Image: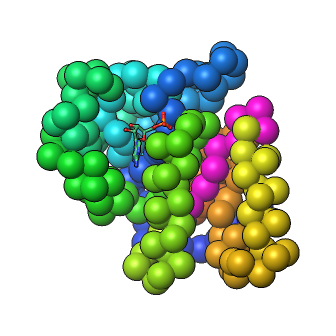
């Protein structure tokens, strides 16, 4: 993992955020999700996410929308009840399978961020990391490290590296920061935190 900023080939207009379908047990998780949603909207970057209202997914979507951002959600039809599909998004894409959901989210995004979450979040994160390893995309990836949530995973990745199960270049390209605008800047998003987008629109 790295805290170095890297140049990217394309402007980042959409960021896919993977996050928990639960809130976690610290208020900082919800606060971090809201801050990331707001930061994306203020940067003029579309949020791509799982299309649900539950857990941190709902928090980040509501925050991005409240700050004037665009939000694109993708949810399998069979999960619209279980994860409570968000009906107030800029666009909600209801697909038939989980695999279609994940592919649609990957295709729609220029970069990926994992918030704190559970098995589903990690499964989605490692899918984009392994697809990069296979050379199927070259989009930046990052971890929003709220309250050090991802320190154990970072340590695990370093262990995999030390034991020679993964190449350094694949570990080092995973950015990690606790603060949303810092993480976005590290990933190559043009972040201007001087003035919220909603205020710019009011001019
Ligand atoms: P979780 O982190 O377990 O709360 O899940 C976050 C999101 O990942 C939820 O919207 C899940 O539907 C989704 N997800 C994606 N892939 C999977 C998978 N293979 N198994 C379970 N959930 C998944």
Colour theme: rainbow
Q: In terms of depth relative to the viewer, which is nearer, 24 or 91? A: 24
In the figure, residue 78 lies in which quadrant?
Answer: top left
> 133 above or below 116?
below
Q: In terms of depth relative to the viewer, which is nearer, 135 or 157? A: 157
Q: Is residue 165 magenta?
A: no
In the figure, residue 70 lies in which quadrant?
Answer: top left
Magenta range is 140-148
Image coordinates for residue 193, horizontal then vertical, percent: 60, 39
Q: In terms of depth relative to the viewer, which is nearer, 195 or 31? A: 31
Question: Quadrant of the image for the C terminus?
Answer: top left
**Does residue 101 appear in the picture of this structure?**
no
Image coordinates for residue 93, horizontal then vertical, percent: 17, 42
> 164 above or below 20?
below
Question: Quadrant of the image for the N terminus?
Answer: bottom right
Q: Is residue 145 magenta?
A: yes
Q: Is residue 167 left or right of residue 7?
A: right
Residue sitting at x 37%, y 42%: 49
Image coordinates for residue 57, horizontal then vertical, percent: 43, 30
Give the image quadrant in which the ligand numbered 1 is located: top left
Residue sitting at x 35%, y 60%: 106
């Amino acid at each position: 993992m790295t805290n170095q900023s890297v140049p990217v080939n394309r402007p980042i207009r959409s960021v896919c955020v993977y996050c928990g379908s639960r809130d976690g047990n610290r208020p900082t998780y919800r606060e971090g999700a809201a801050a990331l949603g707001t930061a994306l909207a203020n940067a003029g970057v579309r949020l791509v996410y799982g299309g649900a209202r539950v857990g941190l997914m709902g928090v980040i979507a509501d925050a991005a929308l409240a700050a004037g951002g665009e939000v694109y959600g993708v949810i399998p039809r069979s999960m619209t009840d279980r994860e409570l599909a968000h009906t107030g998004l800029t666009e909600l894409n209801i697909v038939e399978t989980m695999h279609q959901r994940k592919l649609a989210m990957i295709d729609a995004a220029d970069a990926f961020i994992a918030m704190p979450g559970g098995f589903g979040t990690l499964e989605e994160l490692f899918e984009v990391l392994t697809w990069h390893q296979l050379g199927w995309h070259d989009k930046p990836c990052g971890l929003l490290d709220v309250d050090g949530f991802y320190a154990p995973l970072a340590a695990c990745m370093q262990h995999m590296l030390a034991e020679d199960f993964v190449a350094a270049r694949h570990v080092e390209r995973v950015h990690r920061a606790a603060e949303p605008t810092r993480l976005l800047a590290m990933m190559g998003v043009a972040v201007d935190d001087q003035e919220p987008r909603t205020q710019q629109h009011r001019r």
